[in-house]
Amino acid sequence: LGLAHRQRAQESRRAARKMLSDVLLLIAQATLELSKYDNRTRQGLQTRWGINSQRRYLTNHASQIAAEFPKAVTDADLNQLALAHDNTDDYEAALHHWKLCLEKVNNQTHKAYYLRGYARFLYRWGRLQDGRKAYEDALRVNLSDDDMARVLHSDTYLLWSLAEDQFGSPDQVSILRERAIAEANRIGQKSRRDYALESIRASHAVSDEQKAEGVASDSVDR
């Protein structure tokens, strides 16, 4: 009986694992589809409403699967669920899944990625001081001082500067941008270094253009 019970439990977890993967893929496809429609036209707006409704349903369904079969859920799943709930403006559910994700992750590099995603989430919801701490925590994650870590740190400072530019203090933008450039200049491999420096230049150029046009970079009708 004990063996049969374990086999049934394993089969249930495998089924849940597949179902969760399938639903998360559908959420990602819906998000990609959303970007194809312009919310400045009536037809585009109606289509986006329909896709958002579908995405909200799928996100709630995925959360139910994850709650029923926690052993089948990875930190990457929880990260995607946090993002999906944030995209549908469900703050409490997004916060819940961010916390679960950060509790579950073991890989230090992944932890740094998740922390800066969590920081962006906090900025978007007006929790600026908590967001700043999360960015600082991402930069403090114990990593080897190699090119991969330098790229990650440069990207993190860049993302932090963009978050300040959009949601926070304009006074911090140039300081954080300079830190991003300093980390990028520490990258040993020339092609990676050039790419990082160009990313910093291009990202702020796009941000400046959006501000000039009065467009928020992640404004989405929900």
Image (spheres, rainbow, N blue to C red):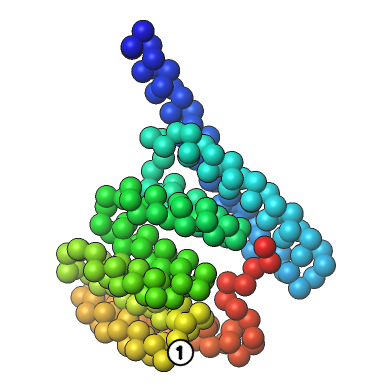
Q: Name the residue under label 1.
A: 170
- Residue at 67% of width from left, 63% of height from top? 222
Snapshot quadrant of residue 201:
bottom left
- Residue at 49% of width from left, 28% of height from top? 15
| Left or right of residue 184, residue 44 in this image | right
- Residue at 27% of width from left, 52% of height from top? 107
Q: Name the image quarter holding the N terminus.
A: top left
- Residue at 24% of width from left, 64% of height from top? 141
How many labels were placed on the picture? 1
Task: Using a 10 Å C-alpha cutoff, classify the residue at mark 1 as few (fewer than 14 neighbours), some (14 to 19) or many (20 or more).
Answer: some
| Residue 18 visible to an observer of this rendering | no
Looking at the image, the residue that sits furthest to the right is 42
Looking at the picture, how far across and down is residue 103, in whole percent?
33, 51
| Residue 167 visible to an observer of this rendering | yes
Snapshot quadrant of residue 132:
bottom left
Q: Which is more toward the observer, 126 or 9?
A: 126
